[in-house]
Image: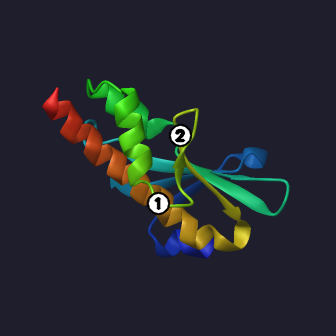
Amino acid sequence: MDELINQMNYHCVSLGSFGCCIHTPFSYTNDGQSIRVFVRDLSDDGLVVYDGGDALLQMESQGCRITRSRLEKIRSLLRDPVTLNDRREIAATCQARYASLVLPEVVDAVLLVNHLGAFWGIEK
């Protein structure tokens, strides 16, 4: 995982037993904040990669209303294994050996939601 993060130009910060926070070179359109994702180990050689709800919080901070239809639109655009969970986090669970495939998928999904937020914010 560390090698993958280095190759992708991401910066990883350990959060101890909680996992790690990965800062990407990408930023949110409304305030320039770094897009980050979190990785947490699960008990069965699995892990979850998720955004902590940041993408939708950023969307709301742009003045964009998060409606049920917009949540459904976002869900329809995400590719398996990435989902939008009940905590409004973009997340994917996988076995640790697939982390190199799942991490970029989650980042792509966050970027997609970021762009939708910018578009829907203009649309108000």
Q: Quadrant of residue 3?
A: bottom right
Which disc, if any, is residue 114?
none
Percent of width and height locating residue 72: 41, 39
Percent of width and height locating residue 25: 38, 58
Looking at the rendered image, the quarter that the N terminus falls into is bottom right
State the residue at coordinates (75%, 47%): 16
State the residue at coordinates (40%, 28%): 68
Do we see residue 88 in this rendering? Answer: yes
Q: Residues within 10 Å of mark 1 (few under 14, many from 20)?
A: few
Q: CA distance from mark 2 to mark 1?
A: 14 Å
Looking at the rendered image, the quarter that the C terminus falls into is top left
- Residue occupied by mark 2: 89
Left or right: where 109 falls relative to 44: left
Q: In the displayed structure, would residue 50 be above or below residue 65?
A: below
Q: In the displayed structure, would residue 62 be above or below residue 17?
A: above
Q: Nearer the viewer, residue 104 or 70?
A: 70
Amino acid, disc 1: Arg
Do we see residue 28 in this rendering? Answer: no
State the residue at coordinates (36%, 32%): 69
Disc 2 + disc 1, Cβ < 8 Å: no
Amino acid, disc 2: Glu
Percent of width and height locating residue 54: 46, 37
Q: Nearer the viewer, residue 37 or 119?
A: 119
Q: In the displayed structure, would residue 109 be above or below residue 68?
A: below
Of the residues under marks 2 and 1, which one precedes in the sequence? 1
Left or right: where 55 falls relative to 59: right
- Residue occupied by mark 1: 79
